[in-house]
Amino acid sequence: MKPHSNTTVDINCVRMEVGGDNSWGLPVLESYRIKSGIYKFRFVIQLKINTK
């Protein structure tokens, strides 16, 4: 990877990984599946300057 001056932040409300209970071939367990619907969330990014 080449160094660069950009910072990327990926913020997800919900996320479901791949793979099942014991194999990539099995589906994700029902209790861990993301139900369809509208999801909302908020976050704040705040700059904190150390004045010591």
Image (spheres, helix red, strand yellow):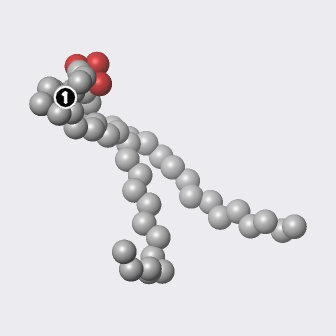
Image point (19%, 28%), residue name: 23
Residue at the far left: name it: 25
Task: Identify which residue, 46 or 19, lies in the foreground.
Answer: 19
Task: Identify which residue, 30 or 4, lies in the foreground.
Answer: 4
Q: For this view, does 11 lie left or right of residue 37? A: right
Residue 45, visible in the rendered structure:
yes
In which quadrant of the rendered image does the N terminus lie?
A: bottom left
Characterize the local packing of mark 1: few (<14), some (14-19) or many (20 or more) Cα atoms within 10 angstroms.
few
Image point (74%, 67%), residue name: 49
- Res 21 → quadrant: top left
Whole-percent x, y for residue 15 in the image: 32, 40
Q: Is residue 11 above or below residue 51?
A: above
Image point (43%, 42%), residue name: 41
Q: For this view, does 15 lie left or right of residue 7? A: left
Q: Is residue 43 above or below residue 22?
A: below
Residue 35, visible in the rendered structure:
no
Residue at the far front: name it: 23
Whole-percent x, y for residue 24 in the image: 17, 33
Image point (44%, 80%), residue name: 4
Q: As shown in the figure, which amino acid type bears the numbered disc 1? A: Ser
- Res 32 → quadrant: top left
Q: Is residue 12 above or below residue 50?
A: above
In which quadrant of the rendered image does the C terminus lie?
A: bottom right
Residue at the far top: name it: 31
Report helix, strand or loop for mark 1.
Answer: loop
Residue ID for mark 1? 23
Whole-percent x, y for residue 26 in the image: 14, 26
Q: Is residue 50 above or below residue 19?
A: below
Q: For this view, does 42 lie left or right of residue 13? A: right
Whole-percent x, y for residue 36 in the image: 21, 31
